[in-house]
């Protein structure tokens, strides 16, 4: 066995987690709404499983603890910005502690549809203090890699129009009260999200994937990059492994 | 980074803190009765009472889903909802908001659960800074006597059973409350608590609370906060 560098936390570590035990890979797919993350994750999952990797996929508002609560809150008309941020942080913490970390301990590949970065971008787009939210989300593990599916707002608009056929209230940031025009609001809100993600990309070393291309090209790009992630490290151990595998 | 947001609103925020069985809720209730009787518009907010978060908290408790981190975050979510939808608008309207437990409860409880002190303090940075924070100081044995003598059952998380301190719920409760008490004591000075000796009679404690309110906020209560206009002036100390 080649020793691995243990994963670390962005800030204060979670109580009771020994990162040396985490043997799996944590792969994050980030990007704004409607950029095509889910499509890619579904395809990557099938491909990785064919390669013999056990895969856990997870995404926002899917936690056993807070998923339903968030859904209910979104259906009402009184979801304030701080409350929303912290509810999503609760959801994320529940999935991190009860799904992601146990899966990593068991050697799974964890594919996560968004991570703390979307959570932080949404908070920042709603006026939250950057340092505050970064510290709040500091209990997150630093992933092995973050693929940032990047597109311009006009690409997102095309996907909404052609794909879904309607603008969604929350994806349009209607709670920010830019105005009654959903398209206009969507453009302004998603521009803020993209700006916030771009800043994080530079700071946290995201791998930027051009998501304006067609889904097949994006998939091949991701496949190639993820393959490298699993390539044996160079050196004596690698040669042995190559020999064994070859 | 500063802890809390200064209260720049016409309303005032009064909070009570202390371990279970310290008598703080009784005292706050008496205080708010008195303020109302003076014609002051009073609003009341209780820890862990947001309707938006209620189902989630209930689910977590019932199925024992909480970790120290999610327990801390769901209470912060609850607090954020009450701040955004209730406490802040009430303060803007000029009400005297009386809060039964505030961010300090999280500072004491979550740290007792092993959550980082620095992290949880940052988490509540959006909270409005109270104008007055009362801390009801009581020895552990006195508080335990009041709780264990009176109520039927202690709840799982209240007793810190999730921490595995003891298999016996009463013993776990005792250890956990002891830790919380230590946290309160450690922050009392830093947070500028007005410390009330909660072993004295209810009447004595209430008298002291009212004196402190008059001394610290008397002027604002007469001139700044929202008051019921029809209360006759002249017959109360806080008449405009």
Image: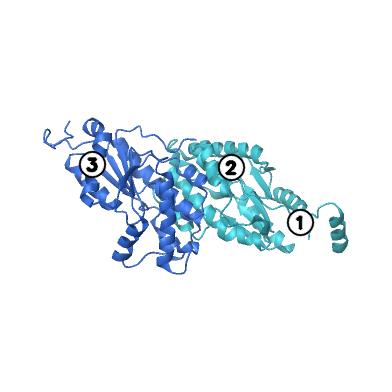
Chain colours: A cyan, B blue
Q: Quadrant of the N terminus of chain A?
A: bottom right
Residue shown at the point (27%, 44%) measured from the top left: B43
Residue shown at the point (47%, 55%) measured from the top left: B71
Kindly indicate whether the residue at mark 1 contacts the one at mark 3 (C-beta within 8 angstroms).
no
Q: Nearer the viewer, residue B172 or A156?
A: B172
- Determine if marks 3 and 1 fall on one subunit: no
Measure the C-alpha gap from mark 2 to mark 1.
42 Å
Q: Nearer the viewer, residue A193 or B66?
A: B66
Q: Which residue is mark 2?
A: A156
Locate residue B128 relative to residue B237 in the image: left or right. right
Q: Which residue is mark 3?
A: B210
How would you rate the neighbour count of disc 1 (Cα within 10 Å): few for under 14, some for 14-19, many for 20 or more?
few
Q: Nearer the viewer, mark 3 or mark 1?
A: 3
The dot on residue A3 is: 1
Q: Quadrant of the C terminus of chain A?
A: bottom right
How would you rate the neighbour count of disc 2 (Cα within 10 Å): few for under 14, some for 14-19, many for 20 or more?
many
How would you rate the neighbour count of disc 3 (Cα within 10 Å): few for under 14, some for 14-19, many for 20 or more?
some
Q: Position of residue A36 (x, y in %)?
A: 62, 49
Q: Position of residue B60 (x, y in %)?
A: 45, 61
Q: Position of residue A194 (x, y in %)?
A: 58, 38
Write down the quadrant of residue B36 in the picture.
Answer: top left
Measure the C-alpha gap from mark 3 to mark 1.
65 Å
Q: Chain of mark 1?
A: A
Q: Is residue B76 shown to the viewer in this render? A: no
Q: Nearer the viewer, mark 3 or mark 2?
A: 3
Q: Among all residues in the image, which is located at the extreme bottom? A: B167
Dot 1 falls on a residue whose secondary structure is: loop
Q: Nearer the viewer, mark 2 or mark 1?
A: 1
């Amino acid at each position: 066995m080649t020793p691995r560098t243990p994963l670390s936390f962005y800030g204060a570590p979670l109580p009771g987690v020994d990162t040396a035990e985490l043997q799996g890979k944590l792969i994050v797919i980030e990007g704004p709404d409607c950029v095509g993350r889910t499509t890619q994750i579904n395809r990557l999952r099938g491909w990785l499983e064919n390669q013999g990797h056990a895969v856990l996929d997870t995404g926002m508002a899917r936690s056993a603890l807070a998923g339903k609560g968030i859904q209910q809150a979104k259906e009402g008309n009184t979801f304030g910005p701080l409350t929303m941020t912290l509810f999503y942080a609760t959801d994320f913490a529940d999935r991190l502690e009860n799904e992601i970390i146990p899966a990593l301990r068991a050697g799974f590949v964890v594919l996560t549809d968004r991570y703390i970065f979307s959570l932080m971008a949404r908070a920042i787009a709603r006026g939250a203090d950057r340092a505050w939210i970064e510290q709040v989300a500091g209990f997150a593990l630093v992933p092995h890699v973050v693929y940032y599916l990047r597109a311009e707002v006009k690409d997102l608009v095309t996907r909404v129009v052609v794909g879904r056929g309607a603008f969604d209230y929350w994806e349009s940031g209607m709670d920010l009260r830019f105005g009654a025009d959903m398209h206009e609001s969507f453009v302004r809100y998603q521009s803020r999200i993209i700006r916030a993600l771009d800043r994080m990309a530079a700071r946290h070393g995201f791998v930027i994937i051009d998501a304006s291309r067609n889904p097949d090209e994006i998939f091949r790009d991701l496949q190639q990059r993820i393959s490298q992630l699993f390539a044996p490290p160079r050196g004596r151990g690698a040669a042995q492994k190559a020999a064994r595998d070859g | 980074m500063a802890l809390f947001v200064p209260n720049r609103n016409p309303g005032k925020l009064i909070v009570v803190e202390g371990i279970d069985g310290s008598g703080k809720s009784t005292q706050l209730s008496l205080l708010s009765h008195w303020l109302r009787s003076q014609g002051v518009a009073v609003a009341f907010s209780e820890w862990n009472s947001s309707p938006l978060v209620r189902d989630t908290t209930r689910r977590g408790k019932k199925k024992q889903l909480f970790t120290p981190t999610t327990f801390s975050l769901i209470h912060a979510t609850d607090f954020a909802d009450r701040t955004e939808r209730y406490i802040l608008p009430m303060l803007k309207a000029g009400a005297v908001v009386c809060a039964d437990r505030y961010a300090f409860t999280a500072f004491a409880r979550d740290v007792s659960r092993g959550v980082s002190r620095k992290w949880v303090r940052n988490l509540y940075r959006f909270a409005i800074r109270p104008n007055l924070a009362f801390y009801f100081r009581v020895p552990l044995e006195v508080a335990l006597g009041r709780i264990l003598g009176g109520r039927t059952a202690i709840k799982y998380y209240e007793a810190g059973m999730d921490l595995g301190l003891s298999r016996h719920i009463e013993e776990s409760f005792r250890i956990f409350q002891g830790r919380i008490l230590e946290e309160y004591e450690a922050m009392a000075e830093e947070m500028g608590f007005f410390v009330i000796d909660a072993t004295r009679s209810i009447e004595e404690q209430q008298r002291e609370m009212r004196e402190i309110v008059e001394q610290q906020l008397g002027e604002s209560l007469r001139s700044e906060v929202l008051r019921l206009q029809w209360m006759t002036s002249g017959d109360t100390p806080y008449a405009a």
